[in-house]
Image (cartoon, rainbow, N blue to C red):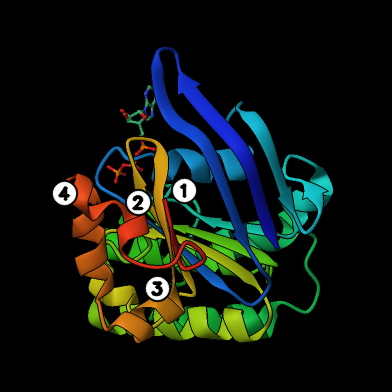
Amino acid sequence: MLNVTHVTKKYHKVVANEDINLTIEDGKIGILLGPNGAGKSTIIKCIMGFLKYQGEIQVEGLFNKSVEAKKIMGYVPEIPSLYPNLTVDEHMEFIARAYKLKDYQAYKDELLTRFDLDDKRKKFGDELSKGMQQKLSICCGLLPRPKLVIFDEPMIGLDPHAIKELKLVLKELRDRGCTVLLSTHMIDSIEELWDTTYIMQKGRIAAVVQKEYISETGKSLEDIFFEITEGGAENEPESQAPESEVQG
Ligand code: ATP
């Protein structure tokens, strides 16, 4: 379970996140949706403990910057950050050793096969295409079987097979009781996956949309997104659903 309470992050005078509150239960997928610069990557970096911020963040009840919390957190960054002189195999080994994993070989093989990297095991980081780097970054994030997995724009650069595979992985994580948080611009690609969507705008959470709201109203997430991010006062979130379903 992920709990973010009253988190504010400023880069000097720029308020990148203002009073962010969000909760994602075990076995649920939360989505961060928002225009460029809305603050999605910043809140993700706060949750991962990379930045200083005001407020409180807990993962499974643990302080997010504690070693215990970090052991159960997985992260796939927006831009893959690989080692140019390590091979695909060595990246996975590095993660396995850093997390002191045991019995990981079968899962490592499975991930590399599923993401079409099996025949690229000997390729170095700087020999991989952009999409291959992204796939390896996903495999590295998943190898420790984290309880909380955070993906920042994971679909970018992926081919259709990898997108399909990633969606399957997300469903499996949910079924395993993991907590998943994913930021994306590709609304279509996540339509059937999420439980709660947080629509961000100008550093704030402008609306919280529950899955049930979509089935009850027949509105698409895309419609709601544009109403909130491009609509006027008449499209305030409260006007679209009872407060328990869509909250401003
Ligand atoms: P995108 O969809 O383009 O990735 P985002 O929603 O992830 O955007 P952030 O990267 O979190 O947005 O940026 C939020 C705000 O914080 C923006 O105004 C951005 O210019 C600012 N910002 C982000 N990183 C820094 C930084 N290192 N220093 C100063 N300002 C920053």
Which label's residue is closer to the chain start, 1 or 3? 1
Looking at the picture, tell me which residue is in the foreground, 115 or 164: 164
Which label's residue is closer to the chain start, 4 or 2? 2
Residue 163 picture location, percent across and down: 32, 78
Residue 30 picture location, percent across and down: 50, 65
The amino acid on which the numbered mark 3 sits, given as a three-letter code, is: Lys
Residue 215 picture location, percent across and down: 36, 86
Relative to 50, residue 88 above or below: below
SS assignment at label 4: helix
Q: Quadrant of ligand 1?
A: top left
- Residue 77 appears left or right of 223: right
Relative to 146, residue 21 above or below: above
Question: Which mark identifies residue 120?
Answer: 3
Which residue lies under the disc numbered 4? 230
Relative to 43, residue 118 above or below: below
Q: Are marks 1 and 2 in contact (CB under 8 Å)?
A: yes
Give the CA separation, mark 2 to mark 3: 12 Å
Which residue lies under the disc numbered 2? 126
